[in-house]
Image (cartoon, rainbow, N blue to C red):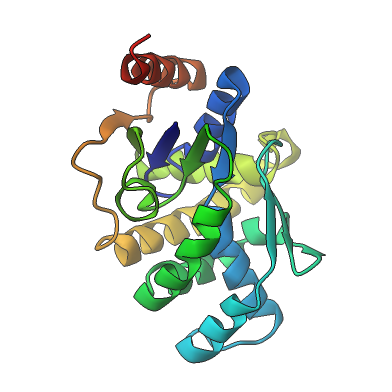
Amino acid sequence: MIVAIDGPAGSGKSTIAREFAARTGFKKLDTGAIYRSVAAICLRENIDFSDTESILKRIERLNLDLDGSQAQTQVIADGIDLSEYIRTAEVDRAVSYIATNASMRAALLPIQRSLATKKDIVAEGRDIGTVVFPDAELKIYLSADARVRAHRRVAQRHEHDITTLDKDAYNLEYVEVLRAIQYRDEQDAQNMIPSVDAVHLDSTEMGITEIVDELIEYMNEKRGA
């Protein structure tokens, strides 16, 4: 069974997918980390984001390994650990160049699908239920207020412990992340169309356990449990 979780940045896709996987035994697939990995490689190798041909050639040579069992998806690209780098503000600003390019998205489809090797997976990322896994048995679309999403992203960067930041440092990072999220939302507007058969959940005021409980109920309904 494939459970596909779609939604904008910071809506809780990764956290919900991880907790769902932990409670159900499903394998977690973070497709957003794939786009981020390509953006990170372009930044590291000084590949111009306007040079689609060069990026497509680089994708052809990309050897990517993802481990979604930990709090943050661990990413090894061509033998290099990019797990921390793909979550930086620099990659936040750059990833939309990859995610909004139709040719690049198409080139990454085989990689995304090849990583779904087990029978039961929970996959999260943009257009996961419309393009990547259109035949997924259960599709979820998570949304949340942009301000809440920005706070979550800052917390995610600091492993959910923002007590390590003083107020001024938090505010500076929060504003930067909020602007990046709002910009990404604008760039992704054309691609962020939920699947017509997706279940919509607004996670703004919902807790993790509450959301996962609902997902498990929907899963059991699909399986006829």
- Left or right: residue 162 versus residue 116 is right
Camera sees residue 195: yes
The spot of residue 134 in percent (x, y) is 31, 47
The spot of residue 24 in percent (x, y) is 56, 20
Asked if residue 103 is positioned above or below residue 153 in the image, the reply reads: below
- Left or right: residue 115 versus residue 81 is left
Q: Residue at x 69, y 36 (%)?
A: 69
Q: Which residue is at the front of the view, 188 or 129?
A: 129
In the image as oriented, which residue stretches furthest toward the top? Answer: 225
Q: Residue at x 47, y 43 (%)?
A: 124
Q: Residue at x 60, y 34 (%)?
A: 27
The spot of residue 181 in percent (x, y) is 43, 56
Report which quarter residue 97 is drawn in: bottom left
Report which quarter residue 202 is drawn in: top left
Asked if residue 127 is positioned above or below residue 2 in the image, the reply reads: below
The spot of residue 35 in percent (x, y) is 53, 63
Asked if residue 102 is positioned above or below residue 157 in the image, the reply reads: below
Q: Residue at x 27, y 30 (%)?
A: 199
Asked if residue 116 is positioned above or below residue 198 in the image, the reply reads: below
User: In which quadrant will I find the N terminus?
Assistant: top left
Report which quarter residue 196 is drawn in: top left
